[in-house]
Amino acid sequence: MKKHAFILNKVEVKILMDKESESKELLTEWGLAIHIRAFYGKDHIDILFDTSITGKKVLANIKTMKLDLSHLEYIVLSHKHFDHTGGLVDILKEKDDWVSVLHGKNFFEQGIMINPFLRQLTLMPFLREIIIKEKGMLTPIWHPLEFAPGFFVSGRIPFVTDFEAPSLPARRMTPPHMHQDEIEDELALTIKLGEEIIVVTGCSHRGIVNIVKNAITITGISNVRAIIGGLHLVSASEERIAKTIQELQTIGVREYYIGHCTGDDAIEQFKSVLGDAVHVTKSGVEITWGQN
């Protein structure tokens, strides 16, 4: 696809998997998968952002929602945790041709939780060869990149706030060493539609305000139409949630589609301040911006 020949004019976003559902026909789990269809006049491509935990469940929802994978060209993995990558291999098996799989720094280093007990956060170190065998074209992202017209991945997201930092008691393994895991592999996706941007995030471990500010820096556009995804405020203090809301208000974010790891208390706090601008993501939620 020649970049100069295409102008993004419409985006359809469909939540394939979250912990709640729009209907009893759609499956749920503690994971996230988002289907994005990008329209360039009469042409379109599909992008999958995260693959949840269970590929068979994601594929079942794809079928129920009357989608298919024939136009799937890119899979963007927000970070290496199993609830965002677990379905990858099953999804790749449904494709006959190669798919670009975009991932961030340290993605294949082993991640573990150490509290309250030791457990694996990711299977990625053990799946690299399987992903390639199933025609996943692994594409490491070190710096911001426009990989399709109007679609940017963040690269490493810098910390610019004084209240956002990864709070998981997690470590990453670079044998024989073990390091605090600051989730440097986390990628956010920014969609540039006209003169506004839409920010798609998996868990926002690096901080949703940091993520949005980074998206503005990358694109040069400060008009933020919407945020979609998990904000990882499930165990955050009321003070941090309030600071997050205040910062996002200052930035001028107009719409919020939040769920997964955001936390029920945080969602209610967002709703109490921002009202009808806040929507909960569930399996089956559909959002469209732009026009043909």
Image (spheres, helix red, strand yellow):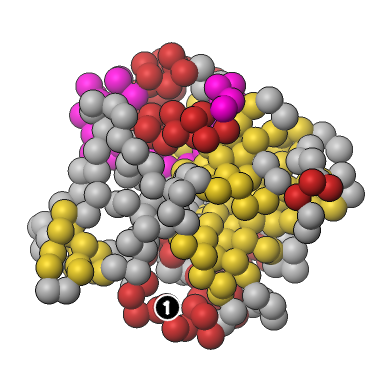
Q: In which quarter of the image is residue 171?
A: bottom left
x, y percent for residue 274 = 46, 17
Q: Is residue 209 above or below residue 33?
A: above
Quadrant that contains the N terminus? bottom right
Identify the residue under disc 1. Answer: 128
x, y percent for residue 123 = 34, 73
Q: Would residue 263 be seen by someone viewing this image from the given angle?
A: no
Q: Which of 90 and 161 is in front in this view?
A: 161
Q: In this view, does 14 lie to the left or right of 202?
A: right
Going 44% across and 64% down the picture, which residue do you hit?
Answer: 85
Number of other residues with Cα within 10 Å of mark 1, as a class: few under 14, some 14 to 19, many 20 or more: few
- Tell me if residue 223 is in the magenta stretch: yes
Going 75% across and 50% down the picture, which residue do you hit?
Answer: 3
- The kind of residue on which mark 1 rests is Arg
Q: Which of 202 and 189 is in front in this view?
A: 189
- Tell me if residue 20 is in the magenta stretch: no
x, y percent for residue 25 = 61, 58
Going 76% across and 41% down the picture, which residue do you hit?
Answer: 8
Q: In this view, does 271 lie above or below 134?
A: above
Quadrant that contains the C terminus? top right
Q: In this view, does 199 lie above or below 80?
A: above
Q: In which quarter of the image is residue 262?
A: top left
Q: Is residue 236 left or right of residue 42?
A: left
Q: In this view, does 270 lie above or below 27?
A: above
Q: In this view, does 58 lie to the left or right of 206?
A: right
Q: In which quarter of the image is residue 223?
A: top right
Q: Give the range drawn in magenta.
A: 220-244
x, y percent for residue 142 = 43, 54
Q: Which of 247 and 213 is in front in this view?
A: 213
